[in-house]
Image (cartoon, rainbow, N blue to C red):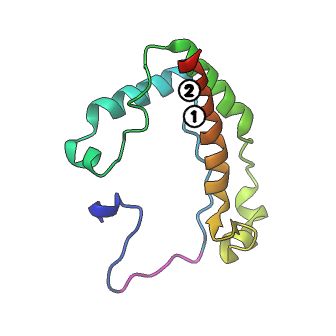
Amino acid sequence: LAEKGGHHIEFTGRRVFPYKFLMRHYPFRSKEQTLRKMRDRQQQASRTERAHGWHSIYDQYDTSDDALFAALCAENRQQTQVFSTDFLTDYLIERLSGVGVERRGVPRWQLIRRTVMHRVMTLLRRSQSG
């Protein structure tokens, strides 16, 4: 379990839950939360975790740059839709079957997350070069 960071679990007798867990991921909710998350991750990650390549995404950025992270939060809010309270019932077929959720073997949530993260990384790079 620890070798994969809890993301891929294999054991004898494993059963798969019948519903797909379709979730939204909001990495940057507010300037304060974003800065706190980055500072905490930079300080708390163990050497073992870092050896696995975990928790290093924020290391290259200056957490004292308030304007940069305010822009990241605004970009994140703009790119993510409001989660509907009817989502669980409206998407029951997708949650059971996975139809419409995965495209070319990639879960839709990963495509959305990659798009948002691509925009975030682009903003970060622009801020460092200019």
Point out which mark residue 111 bears: none
Is label 1 in a helix, a strand or a loop?
Answer: helix
Above or below for 91 versus 116? below
> Would you call the spot at circle 1 few (<14 residues within 10 Å), some (14-19), or many (20 or more)?
some
Amino acid at circle 2 = Leu
Q: How far, Cα to Cα, is label 1 from label 2?
A: 5 Å
Which quadrant would the C terminus be assigned to in this image? top right
Residue at image position (36%, 61%) is 6
Q: Residue furthest front?
A: 129
Above or below for 19 versus 36? below
Amino acid at circle 1 = Met
Q: Is residue 126 left or right of residue 63?
A: right
Q: Residue furthest bottom?
A: 13
Q: Is residue 62 left or right of residue 49?
A: right
The quadrant in which residue 42 appears is: top left
Residue sitting nearer the eye, 1 or 117: 117
The quadrant in which residue 57 appears is: top left
Residue sitting nearer the eye, 58 or 86: 58
* Residue 91 inside the magenta-drawn segment: no
Residue 73 percent coordinates (x, y): 61, 26
- CB under 8 Å between discs 1 and 2: yes
Residue 109 percent coordinates (x, y): 64, 56
Which quadrant would the N terminus be assigned to in this image? bottom left
Point out which mark residue 121 bears: 1
Extent of the magenta region = 13-18
Residue at image position (74%, 42%) is 81
Point out which mark residue 124 bears: 2
Residue 98 percent coordinates (x, y): 68, 73
